Each structure stands twice: as structure tokens, then as C-alpha cells.
Image (cartoon, helix red, strand yellow):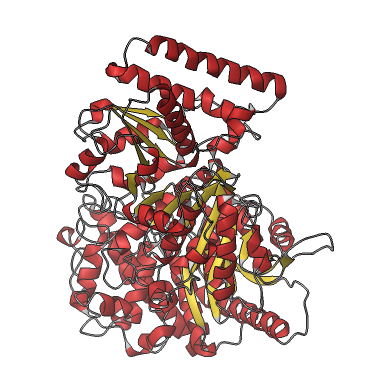
Amino acid sequence: MAESVMSDDEVRAIDAYWRAANYLSVGQIYLLANPLLREPLARRHIKPRLLGHWGTSPGLNFCYAHLNRAIRARDLDMIYIMGPGHGGPSAVANAWLEGTYSEVYPEVSRDAEGMRRLFRQFSFPGGIPSHVAPETPGSIHEGGELGYSLAHAFGAAFDNPDLVVACIVGDGEAETGPLAASWHSNKFLDPVRDGAVLPILHLNGYKIANPTVLARIPEEELVQLLDGYGYQPFLVGGAGEIGRVSGDEPASMHRKMAAALDQALNEIAGIQRDAREGRTSERRRWPMIVLRSPKGWTGPKEVDGQPVENTWRSHQVPLAGVCDNPEHLAQLEEWLRSYRPDELFDEDGRPAEALLSLAPEGERRMSANPHANGGLLLKPLTLPDFRDYAVSVDKPGTTLTEPTRTLGSFLRDVVRANPSNFRIMGADETASNRLGDVFQATDRVFTGEILPTDEHQAPSGQVMEVLSEHLCQGWLEGYLLTGRHGLFNSYEAFVHIVDAMFNQHAKWLKVTRHLPWRRPIASLNYLLSSHVWRQDHNGFTHQDPGFLDVVMNKKPELIRVYLPPDANTLLSVGDHCLRSRDYVNVIVAGKQPALNWLPMDAAIAHCTRGIGIWEWASTEGGEDPDVVMACAGDIPTLETLAAVDLLRRLFPELRVRVVNVVDLMRLQQSSEHPHGLADRDFDALFTTDKPVIFAFHGYPYLIHRLTYRRTGHAHLHVRGYKEEGTTTTPFDMVMLNDLDRYHLVMDVIDRVPSLGGRVAHIRQRMADLRLSMRAYTREHGEDAPEIRDWTWPY
């Protein structure tokens, strides 16, 4: 890369800014006091526990300084994503230099005392975390779990035509599966309606204790790889000699980085201008930068005779023995003074005026950009009245509807009403999950070659489909975190692929709820369909309802799990979730034709309660029941009501109460979850001493976990998925897991002692029916007519 035409004064100025950020980064890792080294460094000035990551920080600071130069020169609207999020000292240092940190946290003022507080709090009890956490102004990506930076960056750029997202991709992070898939995100970026992403691949050569793959392949091979992904890489630093990077010439590096950044930004502007003015419709190669710099740049070159700078030893704390080793302490002081802090900060500890003039102003500061605090920009969705899509239900349980197809009609009009702030993500499953009506209003986004035989593919649209759940989740998170709305639809079993991503997003939300300056964002909405009980055609690998168990581990105030039993309840739940803020909503709903149970008014009332008695199906007649038949999920509801039909005919004197659960969190105690039922209300529904036969969509243990402190828990018997499955018929699936109607009747017989002496014969009859139903499937390849065609009797 040719060097830019920067004057010597410009180079000195940007180098000073970089030195200041590096000084602040080192200080955060090591210092409790004496932040400006106004006295010789002593043991009492050092933290007792040295935590943090130095190795990536100087490279991050280098990029930040140069991006600031570009923002000022071009008046850019830009945010900065640090893939190596363990470089937290860098993000905090730059936010403090820009003044944003002191605006958000006035006690950490931009002076000597504020610097002391800044240093002391880092990775210190009661202070701030070591990573680019939610507490860090300007961050939408913590980067603790590596691999998601580039997906977040593209998600932030979608529908943000004026935004540039600079994304630092660590070379270690680049080895993860999600990041490897994320390079393909450029095939889904529309230069007309979207913003731009500028990836900066930071090749500092090392992870914790190993070299990185991309830093150790020939430069020609690396360029070919990135070129094959569809990028135009601009190279900065090094001569391409593997494993040998010199950091001794920062002036030359500054000039090369400035030139690369100018060229990349010119390319971005040209791509967008040509597309927006209609001069080309061809997919162009977006620019990126490859920065090769030493790990631990400007830090100690050697410690105790071992090389440190430009090796893996600089990854965390290069001088780990400063508390006990006077030589290490002296080396730390020499390191800190090498940045010449007296030139960078005035007598009061404020950044020198020359530094302040280099930072952008107001919301152009990356640490103060409102896109990085998306709740500031969030606008409510314009939602159609979901009641207009209601399925007519004259008699419960007599007509069939595909619930997700009904929801798809609603979502079609949500898409139409919100063309620039709502997107649907899916791993090639939107049509399969019966949401196909949305394609009446929009297309799938794809900027690659589109053939005449393709359907609903276009460079612009509001449905994002790629066969990577990681990308779907990462794009949606970036989209939500920058102030928009969306929905991720997935096969139930395969949402497990993003268990860890859900985990990280839930942690982010947990922290932001306690930061008043972080405004609420739209909820992360999952629609899980093609679920365990209707994956009979794909088999065992597609049968897993365990995401609910994963979700339930997170903070109760964040988590909502809904199991609507039919189309109208799904509409009500869907509308509610799209209006919500700062939650993770999980909706599990079937796509196959299913019985309609509730007219819309009743569905709304039932969903509002979250749990309730279905009087029309119960036989208790206002008295205490003999047994409670509870259900949560569409197929458990079907089997429960079919079992109640049998019980009504077999034991007409039996008082049966049917309780349906839509909001799973209602089962928890009110002291444990905001939606939880008080004990008296729970006992009123389920009784304290009567048997409860609970048919559940997922693993039975989850219901026990939610209810173990309830008075009548000893009387609770749960049927659900017990890891039995194969390619078979729908009813054989429930029989394999003892969730079928006949087994539920047997459970009642086993637990209601007042049924009399004839129960043995009836129990045997139920067992025989199970055998005959299974035999029918083996002979005919489908379920028996009395199963397939069952409806609620009138």
C-alpha cells in the first residue's frame, strides 16, 4: 500500500493521539494511583491483581485514531465494532479521550482525578469488566465470545444508508465458524438502501498461546482468500514475511494506514453513488483493510530474557510480576514513560488541546454515536390489528388451520407497514415454516446472481435467508442493537446452533437494564416451528425441544416463553412480542394443520391471563375436580383434549378440570418471575391435593423445575419429550414418548383412586389401543382415521 500524503505535523498529531490511548490502556491494566507518573512508580501504585489484555489494544487504538481522522475529514456517521472485545482498555481509553465517558459517568472526569478513577475501576471489584461490555459507551458488541463481530456489523448497516460500520476482526476470531461464514454477508448488503461495512482484519499473529492461521499463510494466499469472498483488500504493514512484523516505524505505518483508509472509503462512496444513481446493478467488491502489526505493539520487547512484543506472551499482562519484582516495576515505569505522558496531558491531567482537536465532535464521536445506543433511535412498529387476521371458531376443536401460515399473513402486512425498520431472518426456513405470505410484500435479499427460476430473490428486501443460524442471529442482533425490530424464525431443533449467541445477548440485556443511559431496544423474538412433535418426517436429528431449557437459565426479568395452542392465540402472542422491549421472547408454534380451539376474543383473554381453565372442555361443574389435566403446547393440548374426550365417555362421573398454559413463566412463583402466579392463584387452578397430569411440549423436567416449590408438586405428573424419536407418523411420535391420549388416560387411572374396580379392564383397553394404533402405522404407513380425523365431540 502506497503511503498517503500526510504532512509530518499530521503524522505527529495522530501518533500523539495513539500514544495517549496506549498510555491509558496500560494504565487501566496496572495502576491504582499516580496516574500521570508525577512521582516515581511504587508498589503501592499497582493493583494487587493484574487483569486485562494488552496484546490487541495498541492495534485497536491505532485503528481508532485513524478512523477519527477519517470521520473529521469526511463528516462520517460511523460506529466501531471491536471483534477482539478483550481489548476493553482500548474502547474505554478512547471514550475517555473523546469526553463521552465523562459525560456518561461524570464521576470519571476528564482530568487527573478522573484518570485515577478510570484506571482503578478497570477489572477491579465494583468497577467495570475487562471487555467491551455494555458499560462501555459506543459498544454494541462485547466480544467476549469470539466470532460475531462481522455479523453484528452487517446487521447494524442494514437499512442504515448513511452509516459506516468499521469492524475490527481479530485474526484469532477469524478462525471461528461464525466469523468464517460472516465474510459472505457482503452478498446481502444492498448499496442502495443499506450502509457500508469496512472490515479491518487485524493480523497481529497470535492468540493466547498459539499463532493464528491467517497470519501464517503466504500473503498471496490470504489475498486470494479474501478476494474469493468478494472483497478488495488493502494491505497495511509488514512486507509479507510470515511471522516477522516490525513496529519500529510508526510514522510509515500511519501513512500507510491513512492511505488505505482513504482508498477504502473512496471505494465505498463510489459503490454507493453508482448504485444509488442507477449507473450499475452489478455486485461490486467491497473494500476491506488487512492490518499487519505486532501483537503488544509499543510494549516491552523482552521480559526476563524472553521476547514479548510480537509474540503470544504479550496477549494479556506482559509484566505480571510488578508487585513482587523490582525489575518488572522499573520496566513498567519505563514502558509508561515511553509514551511521554507530559506531552499528552496538561498539568491538571486533561488531554492536551492538540489531542482534543483530533477527536470528532458531538454525535460524530464513535463513543457517542446514537446508533450504538439503539434505543435512542427506536421507533415503535406500525402494526396492523392482529384481530383482522382471526380464524373464525364457532365451535372449539372442529376446524383446522395452519397457525404459522395465519401468522404469516399478519407478518406480511407488518413488513408492508415498516419498510425500513423490520426484517425477518431465517436459515432457509421461512417458506418451510409457512410464513410464505410475506413474499407478497417483499423479497429475500441477495446480491449474487439471480436466475429466472429463482423466486422472491432481489438485491433489496426485508427477508434475510442464509443457511447459517449464526448469521441470522448475528444480523438480527446488530439490527436490534442499532434501534430496529425483527424476528428470527427457525426449526426448533436447529435453534440450538445459536444457544451460545442467545446466551451472550441475554447477558448484554441483563446489564443494560441497569444502565440508565442505555435505552431499551426491541426484543429478540424467536419463532420456533417445525417442532419436535411434527418432525416425524425428518426424524430423530430434527426432534429436540431443549432450547426452552437453555432459555430458562437466564434472568427471569428478561425471558418470556410462549406456547400458543392454536392460530388465534399465536396471533395474539405475536403481536404482543413485536411490541415488547428488552426481552428475549420464544414462541413455539406448529405449522401443520391443527384444530382451532378459541375464537379471537377468548384467545386474547386467555393469552392475557397466560394460563387458564378451559371451562368448555372441563367436567367439574363448579365443584372441586378429581383430576387436573394440564397442557402446554399445541400437540400436548390436542392429546390432552382427546384424552378428556375418552375420560368423559369412560368415566362420566369423573370431575375433570382442563388447564391450558400459554405463558410458561406463569408456572413459576411470583417471587421468582414477574409473570409468576402467586401461590394462592396457582393452588386455585391446580389444587393442592388432586393429581395433575401435565402434558408438556418439551422435556418433563422443566415443568418440575418451574413448580418444585408449589404446594401440590408431589401430585404433579408430567409427560413430555423423553428423547425418543425417529422417522414415523405424528401419533407414533407421541406414543414413543408416552404423551398420547391413551397413555394420559392410563395416567389418570393410576392416580385417581376413586374410579372403582373396573379400571383394570379400561387400563388394559387403553394399552391395547396403543398397540393397535402402532400396528396400523406399520401396516398402512399413516395414522388410523380415528386419530387423523379426531375432533372435539358435540
x and y percentages locating residue 477 in the rendered image: 48, 61
Q: Quadrant of residue 712?
A: top left
Q: Nearer the viewer, residue 187 or 617?
A: 617
Q: Residue at x 40, y 84 (%)?
A: 363
Q: Nearer the viewer, residue 522 or 374?
A: 522
- Farthest residue in the right direction? 452
Q: Is residue 591 above or below residue 793?
A: below
Q: Residue at x 57, y 29 (%)?
A: 731
x and y percentages locating residue 607 in the rendered image: 38, 54
Q: Is residue 640 above or below residue 600?
A: above
| Quadrant (top left/top right/bottom left/bottom right) for the N terminus | bottom right
Relative side of 185 to 623, left or right: right
From this viewpoint, is residue 556 visible? yes
Q: Nearer the viewer, residue 751 or 130?
A: 751
Q: Residue at x 25, y 33 (%)?
A: 708
x and y percentages locating residue 333 in the rendered image: 28, 65
Relative side of 723 to 262, left or right: left
Q: Is residue 220 above or below residue 469?
A: below
Q: Nearer the viewer, residue 616 or 641?
A: 616
Q: Residue at x 44, y 33 (%)?
A: 640
x and y percentages locating residue 322 in the rendered image: 25, 54
From this viewpoint, is residue 84 visible? no
Q: Quadrant of residue 655?
A: top left
